[in-house]
Structure formats: C-alpha cells, structure tokens
Image (cartoon, coloured by chain):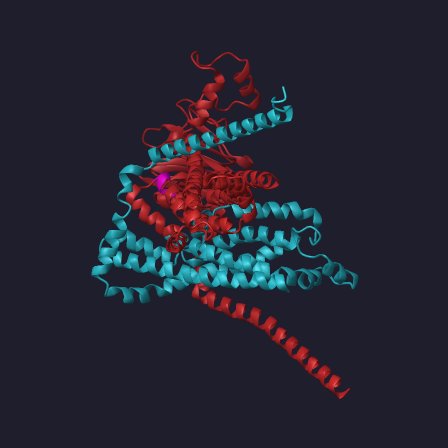
Chain colours: A cyan, B red
Amino acid sequence: MSLAIHPATSEYLSLIRRKRLYGGILVALFAVLLASGFRVADDRNAGGFFEGFHRILDFPTEIFSEAATNWRNLPGLFVQFIPSLIETLNIAAVSTLFGALLASLLAFLSTRGLALWPRMIPVFRTSMDIMRAVPEIVIALVLIFLLGGGPVPAMIAIAFHTTGALGKLFSEAAENADIKPVEGLTSVGGNWMQRVWLGVFPQVAPNWSSYALLRFEINIRASAILGFVGSGGIGYDLKTALQWGQGKYDQVVAIFTLLLITISIVDHFSDRARARLVKGGNSA
Amino acid sequence: MSMAAADMNSLRSDLVRSFLRRKRFSLAVPGLILLYLTYIFFAFDVPGLVSRARPENAAILLGDFWSYKTHVTRDNRTGDVQAAIEGERKGEYPDGTMPDWVTTGEETAIALPHGAEVRYLADGSAALSIPEFGDLHVGLDGRQIVATLPDGTNVPDWMSLSRNRISINQNDWRFSMTPAKTETFRYQMGWELFFFTLDSQFHGRSAGELIALAFWEPRLEPDRSNISAMARDVWTNKMWRHGDVAWAMGETVLMAFLGTMGAGLIALPLAFFAASNFAPARWLRLSLRRVFDLLRGVDGLIWTVILSRAFGPGPLTGSLAILMTDTGTFGKTFSEALENIDDKQVEGIQSTGASAVQRMRFGVIPQVAPVILSQLLYYLESNTRSATVIGALVGGGIGLLLTQAIITQKDWEEVCYYMILTVITVMIMDNLSGWIRRRIIKG
C-alpha cells in the first residue's frame, strides 16, 4: 500500500501524457500539411522538384562560364550599369524618405495620448494596415498604366507600402515614449505641433531612424524586383539581359555582382548605424 | 572666485557653441533633403512625367473598377441582334433573351439612362432620341453613313461623324455605327455575373429566391441538390473564374507556408552548429555564418531567376526562392537566440544526470521555442505578401493573375477583385499570426 503512487503524481503523469499526445498530434498534423503542401506545389509547378534538383547549378555554371570567357567585358559592364544601379538606389531612398515622413504623421495621429483626433485612431490604424497589405507590384503596375514607365511609379508604390509598414512600427515606438515631457509642454501652453516635435520626437528619433534604415535595406530589394516587373532601374536591365539569353550572360553576371555588392555594403553600414542609434538611445 | 567665473564662462561658451551646432545641424538636414529631392526631381524626369501622364486613363480605371458595360450589337449584314456583357463571348445572353431594358421584335428598342433611347429600325437604320438634343436618324447609304441631325443643330463635341463611322459618347452610354455593325454600350455599376453567369439557371434571381431554392424548393436538376448546383455554378463561373482565383490565392499562401516552414526546418539544426556555445568547431561556425550571409545577401530576385531555370515556372519555384532567403535570415536569428540562452537551466538538467539529447530537449528548446515560433509566424505573414510579388516573377499564384489582368488594360474589375482578395488574405494572416504569437509569448 505504501508503494502506491500518490494520486497527485498519477494525475501529473496523465497530464504529461495528454500534453505529449496533443504535441504529437500537432507535429503530425504539421508534417502532413507540409508534405501535402509540397506535393501540391510540386504538381502545379512546370518542372518537378526531383527532375530539377540536379539542374540547380546548371544555370549559374552556364552564365559564369560565359562571363569567365568574356571576363574582359566585366569592368566596362560594371561602369555601364552604374547609372541604373543609382536609379534603383534612388527609388529606394526617396520612397523610404517619403514613406517615413508620411508614416511619422500617421503614427502621431494614431498613437493613444498624442492623437489630434482620438476618435479617428481606428481609422488611421486600419488605413495603415491596408497600406501594408497592398503588394507593391499592384500599385506599380496600375501607376505604369496611368503615368507611363520610369522610376516614379515604382517610387510611389514602394513609398505607399513603406508608409504602412513604418507607420505601425513608429506608432508602437511612440506609444512606449515617456508622456511626461508632453504633459510639461501642455502645462506651459504648447500646441499639438510643439508637443509632438519637442516632447515626443526627440525620444523616438533614434528608434525611428533605425527602423527607417532597416526599411531602406528592404526597399533596395523591392526596387530591384519592381524594376524587373515593369519600371526602371537595374531590375529592368536584368530582365532585358535575361530575355536576350546566351551572349548577354556577362551582363547578367555583372548585374548580379553589382546587386550583391551594393546590398552587402548597405546592409553592413546600416547594421552598424542601427546598432549605434539604438545603443545611443538607451544610454542617453 | 575668478576660477569659478572662468569655469562658468567656458561652460557658457560651450553651451552656446553646442546650441549653434545643433541649430546648424537641424537646418542642414532639411536643406540636404531638399537638395536631394531637387536632384531627384530632375533625375526621375518629373517634368517629362507630367506630359506623359494619361489622366484620362484614371477615369477609365476608376470607372471600370466598379462598373461593367453591356453591348447590344446588330450585325448589319444579317440583321441579328446580340447582347453581351463586356462584349465577351462568355458574357453573351443566350438566344432569345435580352436584358430587361431591351425589347426585341420588329425593331429593337434600347432604353438608356436619363430618358435616352436607341431603336434599331427594321430597315437597318437606327433612330436615337437624346434629351436636350433631339431626335437623330442614322442610316446606311450603300457603304456610307448618313446622319440626319435635329433641325438647327451642328455636330456636337460628343459626336464624331465620318463617311464610314459615327460614334456618340455620353457619360453612361455609347452608340456607334459602321457599315458592318451597329452597337450600343450601356454602363452600369457593380460587378455583373459575379456569382452566376447567364447560362446558369440561378442567374437573375433575388437573394430570397436563391435561399428558398437552396433549402426547400424542388430541385432544378434531378440529380443534384440546388445548393450543390449553386456552388458548382459559382465555382465554375466563366467570367470571374472563382475556382481558379481560389486556387491561385491558395498557391500564394502555400508558397509562403512552404518557404517559411521549410527554411525554419533547415535553419534550426544548422543554427546549433553556428552558435558559439554549441558549435563543435570554430571553422564550421564561421563558414556557416558566411553561408547564411550569402543566402540572405543574394536578393530574392536573383534566387527566383536561378531557380526558375531549374524548376520552371510555378509555386514550387516561388516557395524555394522564399526558402533560400529565409534560411539565411533564420540561421542568423536562431543562432543568436541560441547564444543568448541561460546556461543555468541546462546545468540544472545536467545535474540530474541527463544525456546530451535530454539537455537539449528540456534545457535548450523550451528557452528558444517562443523566439523561434514567433519569428516563423512573423515571417509567414510577411512572406504571404512577398509571395504575391514572387508569384508574378515565377508565374504562380495570385501575382500571376494580377499581372495578367493588369497587362490586358481592360479587366480592371478583375484587378480590383484580386486586390481586395489579396489585402483580405494578408490581413487575415497578419491577425492570425499576431494572435498565435501573443498566445505563445503569454504561454
């Protein structure tokens, strides 16, 4: 009798067993979902996974071997594509700038305790959610129809999405800001602009700049992709070179290299700047 | 005393200088931005853009987003009259049927908004009555158009008239006649045929009638219940292709799901080898880190290009492209999470004599699981959006349908439909992943 398991223990053990069972079912369900999802994707793809798998390296080999035979062209091609690279970077920079400006406005309007019209907070929040959800490519293609080609449609499209994405992050940061400076400014009769500009902005500026920099990194990639689908920049050059096919693979390699180098450089510097911004913000 | 005064003075001048510096800084930043924007203004050729812009397209686009037109066409050789929505074959009214504002018989009378009317007369000519303008007769003399305008009027600016074509543009209807055919377009609001096409037995019935049919009225088709016939007719709707659209949307979500989860499954074990407190060898850790950097650094665009060559277009290629980039991202974040774990928990479990596997299972995994899961969910949500763009590149999912519809430059109502669907899906994923994340973090 003294060896009998204490009722609490047996209850605990059965609880554990049930938990494991649920966990097991969940994992099994997940595995089934993943496997069947893979099957569906494989079926609906033009080429199958297993036929294509050994060919992954074919295309890189092809382009790099062509580029290797024409390696003398590469420096000239780098110079040739610099203007479109700059255009891609400009699209990303301007859209980040405009997006961040609009986002800060929306963020102040949709932060509790700061909003100019507190009743409108849900409206601004929802509009930011929608702006975030609309894919850039849709806006870009519609604007190409309205404005013709060029970098401006891509810029507006990315800025629109950036506004929504940054607006959410900005307002979360503003919500965590200390409200005391704002109260102090209110007590001396500061108006809304002064309260926001002098009371909150200095608190959130480091965090906001860090988010904006991260967004800039993302927007460079987006701008390259949008170029590929329609508008200007280096993405468009890549598309033309790829459509040409053999004979222009040295251009493809040059564009790949330029993109890779640019993205690594920007990522590196923005990483460092962000680390400094956030650290500086905490110690101050 | 003088020392303190000197200190005060130097402090004062320091402060003044620091304020001046701040002042200059706060003026310089907007100045630089302005300068940059001026450069962009010319680099992006904004003045040229204004001249190239086609504002009239905006009107077409906005009108088309939420309206449709019905063509009533007479073939002037045979005399046959046919009505079709958007003038498409799949929107044709079956023989003998017409919209209720068209009456057929000896002559065809088309009632138009604001009291206007067009009649296709039996002799092949057409009579139009337009309020505030008068009655108009358009006939054919051999191969030539002859228009008789109301007395005392000239050709107005909404009408264009030539030897072999007349066209009249009003806001909500249009009329045109050529030797080959006479055509009237009527514009109406809404998405026509959204649920049932004209060949469906359920077309044109009210919501009440449909509910009655679905639940208690007798079957219209003996071998099928009404509700399943309705579902079939909606699913196979030829105008809106709901079935294909649902598949495409599913493909997009599937791309995001497979890409994110696949990347997570690959990155998790690798992360152990890349975390400084678990890595068996320094060279392995450093080289894995470089591999992660490379996967992340190579843009999604480049991955799609390379993978499309191997696997062809489709959702699998898209999910593999997402998988590639995200393996790099997850490898980095997971290994950082592993480096930040608390060793005490692992030591506590070790002290009970646990094996290495048990230490992992009970000491490490519970600490990193919330971080990993919330990362996975966050990326699942953001990848749903990226999958739209990637779908356009690799030719799969809703992205493909969107780009196809936009390129035709006339199916704007479909563009609108896909856009709304995409936004709703992304928002659902957003809320779902936010909800699960909050639950996980709370425990």
The quarter of the displayed image where residue B427 is located: top right
Residue B316: image location, x then y, percent:
36, 39
**Is B317 within the magenta?**
yes
**Is B309 within the magenta?**
no
The quarter of the displayed image where residue B4 is located: bottom right
> Can I make out residue B170 in this image?
no
* Placement of the C terminus of chain B among the 4 image quadrants: top right
Residue A175 against residue B166 in the figure, above or below? below
Residue B347: image location, x then y, percent:
54, 45
Residue A15 against residue B426 in the figure, above or below? above
Q: Residue at x 33, y 57 (%)?
A: A256
Q: Is B346 in front, or is B365?
A: B346
Q: Residue at x 41, y 60 (%)?
A: A264
In this view, which residue lies farthest toward the bottom?
B2
* Magenta region, residue range: B314-318
In this view, which residue lies farthest toward the left?
A69
Residue B171: image location, x then y, percent:
51, 42
Q: Is B282 in front, or is A193?
A: B282
Q: Residue at x 53, y 58 (%)?
A: A212
